[in-house]
Image: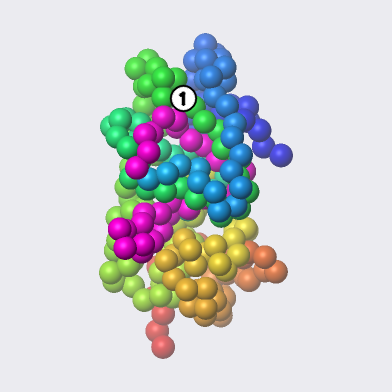
Amino acid sequence: MSSLHTIITESDWGRALTAYELERVLATAFERSVPAGGYAARMGEPSTHWIGLIEGLLKMSVTSEDGRVSTLTGVSAAAWFGEGSLIKREIRRYDVIALRPCRLALVPYATFDWLRQRSLPFNHYLQTLMNARLSLFIGMLEFGRLLDADARVARCLAALFNPDLYPQTGPFVDLNQGEIALLCGLSRQRVNKALRRLHDAGLLQLETRGLTVLNLNGLRTFAYTA
């Protein structure tokens, strides 16, 4: 089982710190548990910590005034998020909700900002992370406007293999169809249909729980033809 110590010391940014910097991070970071359906962070609240996911699955989403919910992306184990809100010192503009019981690693703003002020490798890591997230959101905007539902599911799954955003993703994706539906912004029934088409195309293997990706490039370029 992963630990608070492990998610920090084995991360790309943690390995780039000096011994003194790493010691300060470990001394100030702490762990928090969130039940399934609970909030790891709430839209409209101050951003006070940089957050890493030790274990579980999260989704980022926004809710309109009339109650409509739009999922932005998912967060899997070993991923870090929330740096943009901290850097801008603004209230959080999205909810982060646990799809499963989750364990969070929290780095206080004071420590996060201290690292930004003194560590060039840490700043390089943040630059890479934020650029990867920007590319993800631009891609999602493109998918939503130009692609059919089958291709959207394919691109949604392929996006989980960006190592800058999802460091621990392997060929097996431990997501059920309901979780994939939430991440793709589609109904469970429509995702089920799309997954079967992707399976028939030889791009993935459906498992009892989750799926195994057989052709990642195929998912990235998939376009269904009736």
Q: Quadrant of the N terminus?
A: top right
Q: Is residue 199 visible?
A: yes
Viewer-closest of 147 and 204: 147
Q: Residue at x 55, y 33 (%)?
A: 105
Q: Residue at x 60, y 52 (%)?
A: 36
Residue that protrudes farthest toward the bottom in the picture: 226
Q: In the image, residue 64 lies at what x, y percent?
A: 31, 58
Viewer-closest of 100 and 200: 100
Q: Quadrant of the C terminus?
A: bottom left
Q: Residue at x 32, y 37 (%)?
A: 91
**Which residues are the magenta region?**
44-73
Q: In the image, residue 131 lies at what x, y percent?
A: 33, 42
Residue 109: quadrant of the picture = top left
Residue 52 lies in magenta, yes or no? yes
Total residue callouts: 1
> From what the image shows, is residue 89 above or below residue 115?
below
> From what the image shows, is residue 182 above or below residue 103?
below
Viewer-closest of 165 and 44: 44
Viewer-closest of 200 and 35: 35
Query: Which residue is disc 1 drawn over?
Result: 108
> From what the image shows, is residue 45 above or below residue 189?
above
Q: Going by the image, does 177 lie left or right of 13?
A: right
Q: Given the image, on which type of amino acid does mark 1 rest?
A: Pro
Q: In the image, residue 123 lies at what x, y percent?
A: 36, 26
